[in-house]
Amino acid sequence: MSNITDLQKYSEWNPFIKKAQGRTEVGEKLEVLIAPPDGKGMIFKPTVKSIIVNKEFSWLGRFLFSGIFDGEHIFIIEPKDDGCLLIQKENFSGLLAPLLWKGLDNDTRAGFKLMNKSLKGRTENAGI
């Protein structure tokens, strides 16, 4: 199984993040296409915030500039005796966050649930 930073393989297994490209190095810009199950797809260009191989990967997206609407996504991989645990977190902040939260919460949560289910199936089928 490729690790969570192998953006070119996202489209092979990820029903929510349909496309992701860019250099996975801190400070680099990515281009990400998300498509919630019943929502409208959108492209955003977050900046890689952290990367610890096989442990953590995060990015920060901003609408226009910092403080208007910022979204941080964090993937954390924790080793377990019987495999590993993937934890995802989303932190939204900025002036527009309270106004956009309901739509983001429903669409984003549904998209990440699909992503988690797909990733779980992929890892179980690979024996990981």
Image (tube, rainbow, N blue to C red):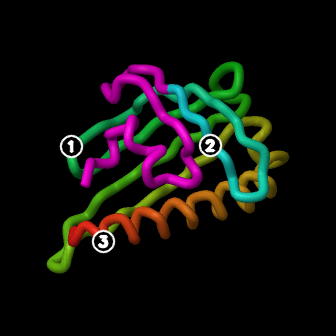
- Near mark 3 (Cα within 10 A), the count class, few <14, some 14-19 or many ≥20, is few
Give the quarter of the image for residue 95: top right
Q: Residue at x 41, y 30 (%)?
A: 48
Mark 1 or mark 2, which is nearer to you?
2
Mark 2 or mark 3, which is nearer to you?
3
| 12 is within the stretch colored magenta | yes
Locate residue 10 relative to residue 24 in the image: left or right: right
Return the mark for residue 53: 1
Q: Residue furthest bottom?
A: 82
Q: Which residues are magenta?
A: 1-30
SS of the residue under disc 3: helix
- Earlier sequence position, callout 1 versus callout 3: 1
Q: Residue at x 63, y 24 (%)?
A: 66
The front one of 86 and 43 is: 43
**Circle 3 is placed at which residue position?**
125
Mark 1 or mark 3, which is nearer to you?
3
Q: Quadrant of the C terminus?
A: bottom left
- Earlier sequence position, callout 2 versus callout 3: 2
Q: Residue at x 80, y 57 (%)?
A: 102
The front one of 66 and 73 is: 73
